[in-house]
Every structure is written in structure tokens, then in C-alpha cells.
Amino acid sequence: MRAPATRPALTLTLALLASPAAHAACKLADIVPGGTYTYRMTGPGSGTFTTTNTVKGSSVRATTTIEGRTSTMTWTCTGKGLSGKLSGAQGAGMTLNNSSFLPPLNLWRPGYSWTSTQDMSMSGGMTSRGSSVTRIVKRETVKVPAGTFNSWRLDTTTTVKITLPGGRTPPAGSPLASGTTVQSSVWYAPGTGMIRSVNSGMTTELVKFKR
């Protein structure tokens, strides 16, 4: 059965929500403070959802549910920045697993970039891997329903490749053989976290938050 057109956007939204910046001293409260954050999506798959951040010691657990699909991202402070692992049942037999590393905030500047990967297991033995390159574009003032924030804009290019059951590659010339490339942008405000993202025709904005 063909996946709904909104699923790539929802999957990317979960990944974006799981990608906060790290402080040089790995202060979780700088970008992933504890609390509850409500977001509004406009475009394909419009609606609202909530992310809850629970801080414990040197780690934070961020739980997000979108249209009945729940993801949990656990970020842990390391000597080099933040190390994160995302997992969650995506529904329809899909499971997303993401291992990420984010550099310290003091390294962030326009043009700075890093890479990450996203793995997905699907029913029937099919798997996919997304390879992302994230680049810091600039710092700018952004207005969303929750307020006006001084934020960092990050652009990400993700290429997703499919592996068929048994480790087979898609036939040459098929739409799956060359992979799919998706462009996305996300804005992070220090002290608050993600305030806006744009991907696959869908815009997500922070509506309210309570710490």
C-alpha cells in the first residue's frame, strides 16, 4: 500500500523536533528546557501537536505525538556536545531510528555544517536510510504565534534511499533507485528550542509553551 503523501513531512517534523543545538557547556536548558510545547502545522497534514521535554541530570527526554504516531528523543550531554537517539513507532508498520550528534553552540556561525542519519524499518522487511547535511544560514528575528524570537535558521538537505527485503537494491531506472531528496528549514531560539520549521510544503510553528 502506498504511504500517504503527508508521511514524509510528518517524519521530517519529528526529526526536526529532535534536533536542538548544544551549548559549549552542554546546558540542556539553553535549547531543550523542560516543559510542554504546542505546535501548529499548516499545509499537508494540518493540525496541532504537543512535545513534552523531561530533563533528568545530563539528559532530556523529548516525547512528541503527531496523528497518533509517537517519537521519543533522548539527548545526552557529552564532552563534544549533544548525542541523541530518536526512536518511535510511526504507524503502519514503520519504525524510525535516529542517532545524531550536534556540535556546541559556540561553533555555530553562518556556513557551519554537519551530517546525520535517519534509519526507518518498514513492514515486509523494507528499510530506508536518510543522509542529511545541515547548514547554519543566519541568525534572524522570527515572529510566530508564541511570540517574537531571536533565532538561528538551519537548512537541511536529506537524501533517502530504499533497500528492498533481503538487502536487495531497487531496479535501475525505478523511482526508488536514485533516492528522494528533501529540503527543509528550521529555526531555533536559544532558551526556547524549535520555533518554526518548513518542509515538504508544511509549516510548523510554536503556538504556546509552559515550563
Image (cartoon, grey):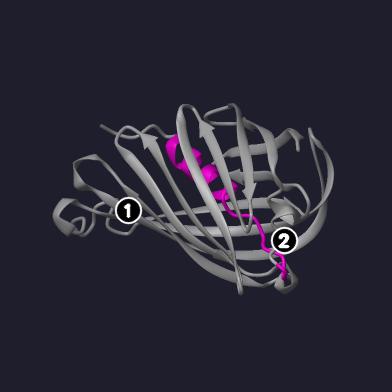
Which x, y percent locates residue 202?
58, 37
Q: Does 208 sit above or below residue 61? A: above
Marking on residue 27: 2
> Relative to 164, is 160 on the left or the right?
right
Nearer to the camera, 156 or 17: 17
Q: Is-magenta flag for residue 14?
A: yes
Q: Quadrant of the C terminus?
A: top right
Q: The residue tagged with tag 2: helix, strand or loop?
A: loop
> Which residue appears at 42% of the width and 34% of the height?
5
Which x, y percent locates residue 76?
57, 60
> Which residue appears at 67% of the width and 63% of the height?
22
Nearer to the camera, 121 or 128: 121
> Which residue appears at 70% of the width and 63% of the height?
137
Q: Does 81 sit above or below residue 151? A: below
Which x, y percent locates residue 39?
66, 33
Nearer to the camera, 126 or 200: 126
Which residue is identified by label 1?
128
Q: How crowded is mark 2: few (under 14 residues within 10 Å), some or many (20 or more)?
A: some
> Relative to 95, is 142 on the left or the right?
right
Front disc: 2 or 1: 2
Mark 1 or mark 2, which is nearer the start of the sequence? 2
Q: What residue type is labelled 1?
A: Ser
Quadrant position of residue 104: bottom right
Nearer to the camera, 191 or 133: 191
Q: Does 72 sit above or below residue 107? A: above
State which region is magenta.
Answer: 6-25
Q: What residue type is labelled 2?
A: Lys
C-alpha separation, residue under disc 2 versus residue under disc 1: 33 Å
Q: Is-magenta flag for residue 24?
A: yes
